[in-house]
Amino acid sequence: MAEKNSWLHLGLGSFHRAHQACYFNHLLAQGESEWQFFAGNIRSDAEATVQGMLSQGCKYTLETIAPDGKCEFETITAISKVFAYEDDLHSIIECGAAASTKVISFTVTEAGYYLDAVAHLDVNNEFIKQDIAGGVSTIYGAIAHIIRARRQANGDAKLTLLCCDNVRENGEKFHSGMVEFFKAQGAGAAEDLAWFEANTTTPNTMVDRITPRPPKELAAEIKEKTGMDDAAPVMSEAFIQWVVEDNFAAGRPALEKVGAQMVDSVVPYEDAKLRILNASHSCLAWAGVSKAHKLVFECARDSELYKYAYDYITDCVIPCLKAQNSPIDLEQYRDTTLDRFRNDHLRDQLERIAQDSFSKFYTFVKPTVLDCYRFNVDPTNVVFLAALYYVFLEKVHVEKNGFSYQDSSFDPKWYEGVCAAADKVQAFADTKLLFDDLGQNKDFVQLLRAQIERARAIH
Ligand code: CS2
């Protein structure tokens, strides 16, 4: 029998297990026999899940919950090999280098790409510096090792590198980050860079399925409802979407048979999703913290907060996307998205949404701030999101209100600088990563000041 094609995923977190692995499961259930799916992590923080999966033959239960509360349980058996974490990623590199591996996809969060305001790789970041020197703690270091091993062992065996994170033009961004990474490694990586350019594609993708952190009670609930003991269960909403640029270097499974949308350009889908879904999520989280909410549905069912998200989308995002000829029914997309947030069976935590808020701001919100000025659209309700983020930072870092979240994209020194400035709002507005050059626009800064007052009044 011919050797199967392999698809390796890096980033075996809840999202991959609820999203891509679910598509793979449906493909295998339809009789797909040419592809097999493997997964592992480039960091050790999800090792408990990995060990849980290994202890039960890599399978696990996915619970999905519809807005009406209807639960479904699916046993995901699609991942046939899971790699336990190793410091040097030895087994993952070996798998990625094998000619039979045709696709490597990854979810390493939006903060995992270390790109600055103009999408240049932040070569001063400590993790990036370590990896330039040969480490494997970022996606760039891991892929660089895979490429070198593959080039040396397998000549020009083509490979697709598929970024599945919520980053605008994610495939292209990863591509340019990778090129800069190789360049920063110097002459010793010249052949790897040439190989990367000649033998890989990096399609853009848009992925969507709200996947809360698995609640502690999930295993007990699954045991009660299905009788199954599961050491690595996961849960998500029932909604699922995957839009993929059809540009695979070495073939792909027939994802369209299981509902993935294979398209020529992902950009309009991605743009709508990041600005409507992800930015509104952040809006609700930043505002929700002022009202001591803990869960997304509490915010989406709070009419004051709902209106902030609704107005931001209606008054700012929709006109800007229409000005760019979006082919999507944006009003309908807004309504279904906000409805999904109201699902009170999905106890999605604000802590999860607030994680990495700094990079979420410039990925999800900033494009609309800039576009409003570009297309002459009233920016008030998107500048209000900037104000919500400003007030959120004050509450959490200055007033220390006890809300706990993590932000690996946030530089405490930057924020100390903002707080120490004579004019804090001006210092915040002057942050190029957040606003490009808008800090020099007096109208913008004045509007921001007024919106900060509006945001401070929420309680
Ligand atoms: C969320 C996303 O983390 C976030 O900010 O908006 O994780 C969101 O739940 C997913 O992108 C849904 O597809």
Image (cartoon, grey):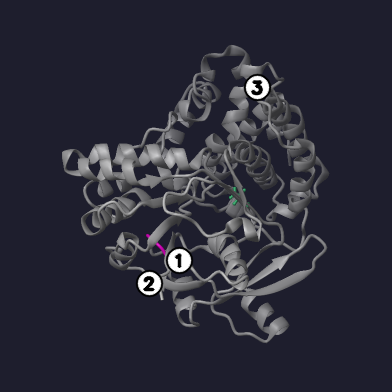
| Residue that label 1 marks | 46
Three-letter residue code for mark 2: Ala
- Magenta-drawn stretch contains 154: no
Which residue was labeled with disc 3? 372
| Residue displayed at 39% across by 71% down | 3
Residue furthest toward the bottom? 227
The mark nearer the N terminus, 3 or 1, is 1
**Secondary element type, mark 2:** loop
Q: Which mark is residue 84?
A: 2
- Asked if ligand 1 lies within 8 A of label 1, the reply is no
Measured as percent of width and height from the top left, residue 54 is found at 45, 78
Q: Which residues are magenta?
A: 38-42
The crowding category of the residue bearing disc 2, from other C-alpha atoms within 10 Å (few below 14, some 14 to 19, many at least 20), is: many
Quadrant containing the N terminus in the rendered view: bottom left
Give the numbered dot on residue 74: none
Q: Position of residue 413 (x, y in %)?
A: 40, 36
- From the viewer's perspective, is 122 left or right of 316? left
Residue occupying the point 62% across, 70% down? 30
Among the two numbered marks 1 and 2 on one chain, the one whose residue lies closer to the N terminus: 1
Q: Is residue 430 left or right of residue 133?
A: right
In front of the other: label 1 or label 2? 2
| Viewer-nearest residue: 46 or 239 | 239
Q: CA distance from mark 3 to mark 1?
A: 40 Å
| Residue 97, placed above or below residue 412 | below
Residue sitting nearer the eye, 10 or 130: 10
- For the C terminus, the image quarter is top right
